[in-house]
C-alpha cells in the first residue's frame, strides 16, 4: 500500500500472497485441475509453458494444519502454519 501523504510504502499480507503467484506463475501458464479435502486450505495449481507445475497452498485459519499433498508420484506430508502460504515447484 502506498501512503502518498507520508510518502511511504507498507507491505501488507496481500503483498506476500500475490508475490507467490507473480514469482512462480509465468505468462502463458494454464490453471490445472485440483482437488481439495478441506475448506481450510485454498489450493491453486498451474502448468507453466516450460512444463513445470506450480502448486500454491494457503491456510485460511488461525490454526496450524497438517496436510498431505499428492501430485502424480509425489507425496508430501507437512504442516502449514496459520495464515501461511507455501509454493511448490515441480519440474
Image (tube, rainbow, N blue to C red):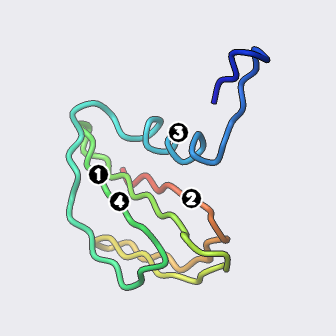
From mark 1 to mark 3, how far is it between C-alphas? 15 Å
Q: Which residue is pictured at 24% across the width and 45% down the height?
A: 51
The mark total stands at 4
From mark 1 to mark 2, how far is it between C-alphas? 16 Å
- Near mark 3 (Cα within 10 A), the count class, few <14, some 14-19 or many ≥20, is few
From mark 4 to mark 3, how far is it between C-alphas? 14 Å
Q: Is residue 31 left or right of residue 5?
A: left
From mark 3 to mark 2, how far is it between C-alphas? 10 Å
Q: Which residue is pictured at 24% across the width and 40% down the height?
A: 29
**Which disc is residue 85 wearing?**
2
**Mark 3 touching mark 2, by CB under 8 A?**
no
Q: Which residue is identified by label 4?
A: 44
Q: Which residue is identified by label 3?
A: 19
Q: Which residue is identified by label 1?
A: 46
Q: Which residue is pictured at 29% across the width and 51% down the height?
A: 46
Q: Which circle, 1 or 3, is nearer the viewer?
A: 3
Q: Which circle, 4 or 1, is nearer the viewer?
A: 4
Looking at the picture, tell me which residue is in the foreground, 13 or 81: 13
Amino acid at each position: 500500500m502506498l501512503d502518498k501523504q507520508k510518502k511511504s510504502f507498507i507491505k501488507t499480507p496481500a503483498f506476500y500472497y500475490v508475490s507467490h503467484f507473480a514469482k512462480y506463475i509465468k505468462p502463458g501458464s494454464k490453471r490445472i485441475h485440483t482437488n481439495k479435502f478441506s475448506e481450510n486450505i485454498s489450493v491453486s495449481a498451474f502448468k507453466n509453458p516450460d512444463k513445470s507445475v506450480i502448486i500454491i497452498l494457503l491456510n485460511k485459519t488461525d490454526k496450524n494444519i497438517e496436510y498431505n499433498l499428492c501430485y502424480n508420484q509425489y507425496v508430501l506430508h507437512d504442516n502449514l502454519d496459520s495464515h501461511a502460504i507455501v509454493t511448490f515447484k515441480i519440474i
